[in-house]
Image (cartoon, grey):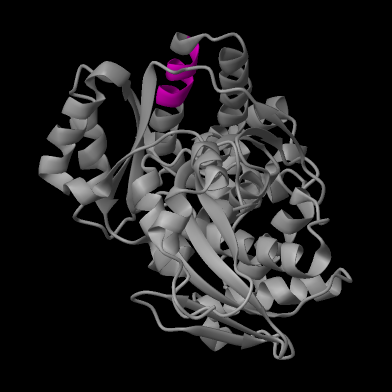
Amino acid sequence: MARALDKNYFKNSKNFGIWCKKLNYASIEEQAQRYSALTEGLFGKISFFSSSGRVELVGNHTDHNHGLVLAATVNLDTAAAVTAREDGVIVIKSAGYPDVRVSVDDIAVNPKEYGDSHALVRGVVKGFIDRGFKVGGFNANTHSNIFKGAGVSSSAAFELLICEILNVLYNDGKIDFVTKALIAQFAENKYFGKPSGLMDQLTISRGGVSYMDFEDAVHPSSFSVEWKFENITPIIINCGGDHCNLTDEYAAIREDMKKVSAALGKECLREVDEKIFYDNIALLHKRCGGRAVLRAKHFFEENIRVKKALAAINNNDEKLFIDCINASGVSSYEQLQNCYPAFDREQNIPLALQLANTRDCVKAARVHGGGFAGTILVFADKEKADGFIDYMAGIFGRENIFSLSMRGLGATMLEV
């Protein structure tokens, strides 16, 4: 097969319509055109994949200290049309980006590739090989509407896409979601050069709304949560700025928290008794500094909020859930201090938060994801969400406002 499948092939496919509903795609027509374009230039049997973006609901910067998180996959994704190759070469094409070409026999870490997609592919392949899984080559045409560098985990979506392609093509789809998440995190940490926790990868690997406990970072516990708040619309606002060059800012959060735990004789804050932390504030202030103490305080308080937010969802208590989101936002701003880096004069996230909180339809607003640049997460009254989007679009651009829905699947193959 060399010529692209016509969009009518997808529109007339009952299975494609079913998958569009599973993935919460807004328009079958639009997605039929999208997947049709992805088949251009591919030969042989084509398989289709989708790997979602994610939103962190509560649990800002807690996972890297073995804390608690509530997060969810959403209907922004990276889609791919894939065919197998017999020469062990992985070739990934995406419009507007240079081709990625990696041999499964060439997987050494290359510091010159930090921050580059080649590094992620090599890291995933290495993670498969180290665990005794099979690997092989493939061609993939991809398209993503997950905006890069703005906190919706475009890199984790890409990692899990590669994981799932290798899982399906060469391992009969047998690899569990935790293992795939760990491989993806390994690729990001060791090959991509970003010291991320496991939250992004585990959320996208599992799919849906997930409660995650990282006390055991190698085998974290997690379970699915049924989303019940249909009267509120989650909205992501890309405020401007790219967090791709802010790795040092993210690393400093982990380093500050580690200073506090080390001063109390522990490896991470999860191992620290909360009462001992508060009893030693004066000592910690002298040894670690005020910022480190504030960030540690955020960690302890945020874990409590995650539990409260979980109870709120389970009990359909919208007010308590909204209170948890707002409190998390205040703590991230004032204690975690990840709404803007010290050198930033633009301060797009503080501006977006202040403007959002002036609108009567907004129930909650908070910095989203890693912070420092990128996005905020807003929960708006569903009936008034369109008016709010129009207002914010006039400031940040309509192309930067995303009305979301929760999606029950993360990285997956579409059986079309």
**What is the chief secondary structure element of the magenta stretch?**
helix
Q: Residue at x 23, y 30 (%)?
A: 356
Q: Tell me how many marks there are.
A: 0
Q: Nearer the viewer, residue 174 or 362?
A: 174
Relative to 151, say whether 103 is above or below: below
The magenta-colored residue range is: 320-327
State yes or no: residue 196 in magenta. Answer: no
Residue 68 shows in this picture: yes
Residue 110 shows in this picture: no
Query: 384 left or right of 32?
Result: left
Percent coordinates x, y for residue 32 in the rendering: 41, 54
Query: 4 left or right of 111?
Result: left
State yes or no: residue 323 in magenta. Answer: yes
Q: Residue at x 74, y 49 (%)?
A: 177
Percent coordinates x, y for residue 41 in the rendering: 47, 80
Relative to 73, say whether 186 is above or below: below
Relative to 203, say whether 175 is above or below: below
Q: Nearer the viewer, residue 12 or 203?
A: 12
Percent coordinates x, y for residue 156 in the rendering: 56, 58
Relative to 377, say whether 289 is above or below: below
Query: 131 left or right of 384?
Result: right
